Image (cartoon, rainbow, N blue to C red):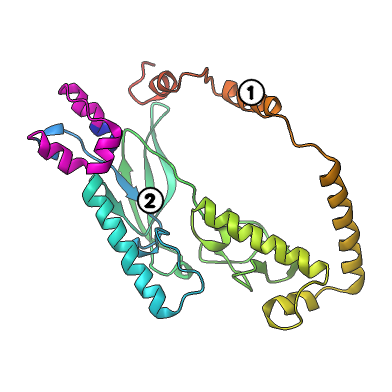
Amino acid sequence: MLETTRQALRRRELPAPLVELEHKGIPAYLQEHGLVWADLGLQGCTVMYRRREEDMPLMEAHDASLQQQDKAHKVRLRILHHAQEKFLFRVQSLVSPVAVLAKDDRLVGLRFQRLSESPANGAGDEFVDVTAPLVVSAIGSIPEPIKGVPQSGELFDFSDPHLGRLPGYPNVFAVGNVVTGRGNISASRKHAREISETAVAAFLGLLPERGAEGELAQTLSAPARAQAQTVADTIDRQLQTSAPPSHHAIEDKVLKQQQRVGYEGDYAAWVAAHSVDAPA
């Protein structure tokens, strides 16, 4: 929204510095220059979200009581609606992308399936096609179906939702947004680290005997713990003697990935060449 607004303002020979536009918000900046949103001739953008608006992780509520969760939901809605008023985007909740819409080998939109408010109830039978000149995909949290892994609706049917354990697979742990249900990198990394440390501690016999973690520890035999200790010692030695990759090695890998998609270092030129309006 900010970039398209800036482009429209530049066509009117107005500078619209990004920081100022972001700080004041689009309506306030336009008002200062005697304009309204309709004057720019822009359609605006719509955030298509697969959960309810109050489920957006704009504020975390870990292990909260029902009262605290209700408060978090209200705060999230206030944050979201304030952002909408400031940056003029729309939100369509409870929809999930199921297919791409293409014309002449170009992406022109997406087909969405409407969902129920409860993820366990899965998707409904209603579909809606949304066309747009630009589609921006965010990190999602819908797991790909895996043969043999039970599902509840569109999510995995975890026997322990926190530890990410699946029925029939006592030594398998899912981590990240496939468990948390939030497309949030920070939350996913935190969960992955917590579960990884818990699993390692269980194998090494370092967990308490009571509680959910104690139940996890009790499922592991003494030989399994001894084997895990050997593996842990080996990994520790390797970490102590292995040097991290050099800056040049990392940069070389990045450059190779950029070359695969024809990126030569000029981001603006690459976007222009690959945008919908780019010459065929």
Relative vertical location of residue 270 with respect to residue 199 in this rendering, above or below: above
Instruction: Using the numbered discs, state the Cα–Cα distance from disc 1 to disc 2 in whole angstroms.
Output: 35 Å
How packed mark 2 is, by other alpha carbons closer than 10 Å (few <14, some 14-19, many 20 or more), is: many
Location of mark 2 (residue): 112
* Viewer-side residue, 24 vs 136: 24
Q: On the rendered structure, is 38 left or right of 239? A: left
* Viewer-side residue, 256 vs 75: 75
- In the image, which is nearer the foreground, mark 1 or mark 2? 1
Relative vertical location of residue 73 with respect to residue 186 in this rendering, above or below: below
* Viewer-side residue, 239 vs 264: 239
* Viewer-side residue, 141 vs 149: 141
Judge whether residue 274 can be spotted in this image.
yes
Marker disc for residue 201 = none
Q: Identify the amino acid type marked 1.
A: Lys
Marker disc for residue 256 = 1
Q: Describe the element under mark 1 as helix, strand or loop.
A: helix
Q: On the rendered structure, is 241 left or right of 152? A: right
Helix, strand or loop: magenta stretch: helix
Measured as percent of width and height from the top left, residue 7 is found at 25, 27
N-term-proximal mark, 1 vs 2: 2
Furthest residue toward bottom:
210
Measured as percent of width and height from the top left, residue 243 is found at 79, 36
| Residue appearing at x 16%, y 43% in the figure | 27
Magenta-highlighted residues: 6-34
Measured as percent of width and height from the top left, residue 108 is found at 35, 34
Please state, as top left, top right, bottom left or bottom right, where the C terminus lies in the image: top left
Instruction: Determine the image quadrant of residue 94.
Output: bottom left
